[in-house]
Amino acid sequence: MSTIDEKTIIEALSGLKHPQTGQDIISGDIVQGITIRDGNVGFLLAVHPDIAEAFEDIRLACEERIRALPGVLSATVVLTAHQSAPSLSSSGTSSGGSAKGKPPPDETIPEVFTRIKSVIAVASGKGGVGKSTVAVNLAAALAQMQGEDGQSFKIGLLDADIYGPSLPKLLNVTEKPELDETKKIYPIERFGMQTMSIGYMVQEAQAMVWRGPMVQGALLQMLNDVAWPELDILVLDLPPGTGDIQLTIAQKIPVTGALVVTTPQNLAVADVRRSINMFDKTKTPVIGILENMAWMSGPNGERLHPFGTGGGESIAAETLNPFLGGLVLDPALQEAADAGQPVITYAPDSLAAGVFVELAQTVTAAVKDLTP
């Protein structure tokens, strides 16, 4: 198979022109974030939102040209708004003589949510607290539960951390998603869950050097251009912080409730406080606060607290949110993650597995209360 590289891709695209200015899309810095993985190519077209519709033909032409290159197995091109361009009339004033204000943000809810009953966001505000591990194991535990009709819950898991996706490792996904006849991406099924991550489509060591609007576009791509089936619950694994991804979610994703993960230390609790404040401002209900790495079992069966105590309980009391208890530092949880499995399938009798079964029961009860 022929080797495909970034230079070849750029050469193939260099003749395509901006539909309004006629400028080459390469020299105009419109093509960004090129990724290549085993013959699968993806990149972004960063354009102003008010000309995005005019760029759809260019997007399709890009995919066609790249797919025609020797060595290319698939091509996925994302059209993402970079910033708002002034309209032709914005340089003047309105009939009343005052300058026009900025347009309101686009808060259109993606059509995919007509097939998804509920959305649970797993957040922390801080990296390194085990949020992705919680999201994966919660989703897996939910997938083993049954509804009132006796049928298993239909669960989806979306890795919304564009810069540091975790699902490929946590679920041992090495294949690239396939496309259906309409060019939508099939989610990858693992352990009864329908899953998607930007990490499925880029090389493991690929640096995701994308600006904020590009990150937002990638998230919406994983919603709009993925062939999600009907789901009872979609679990969103959020990135750390309260930035662009969180803003996009607040504007465009109907989150049913949020699960906030912390560790006992004061530093983690401070960041969690900011995350909870963000949910308060966006009127997103907080289902509760889970304290990860809360304790470990000692040689005589006693509970040891290597990272201190009380962090999760104190922030829950301060913010008037439920405290959902602590997650044990269980070696089975680390071994399951390294094996690319949820702990409830890797070690179903472990302490950690029991915690996630109880957590799934709590979440489903909360979803029932929060869903009209």
Image: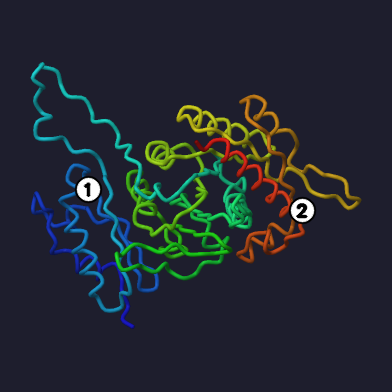
Tell me which amino acid carries mark 2. Answer: Leu
Give left or right: position of 91 versus 216. left
Identify which residue is drawn at 62% across, 63% down: 341
Local SS, label 1: strand
Q: Is residue 28 left or right of residue 189?
A: left
Disc 2 crowd, CA 10 A, few/some/many (<14, 14-19, 20+): some
What percent of the width, then of the height, locates residue 251?
A: 38, 36
**SS for dot 2:** helix
View extreme (right): residue: 300
The location of residue 73, given as percent across then percent down, is 33, 74
- Which residue was labeled with disc 2? 351
**Is residue 263 positioned above or below 95 on the image?**
below
In the image, what residue type sits under mark 1? Val
Q: Which circle, 2 or 1, is nearer the viewer? A: 2
The disc at residue 47 is 1
Q: Residue at 42% across / 67% down in the picture?
A: 177
Spatial CA distance of label 2 from label 1 is 50 Å
Q: Which mark is residue 293?
A: none
The vertical placement of 370 against 160, above or below, is above
Among the two numbered marks 2 and 1 on one chain, the one whose residue lies closer to the N terminus:
1
Q: Looking at this view, is 173 or 28 the one in front? A: 173
Which quarter of the image is occupied by the N terminus?
A: bottom left
Nearest the viewer among 113 and 294 is 113
Q: How many circles with numbers are drawn on the protein?
A: 2
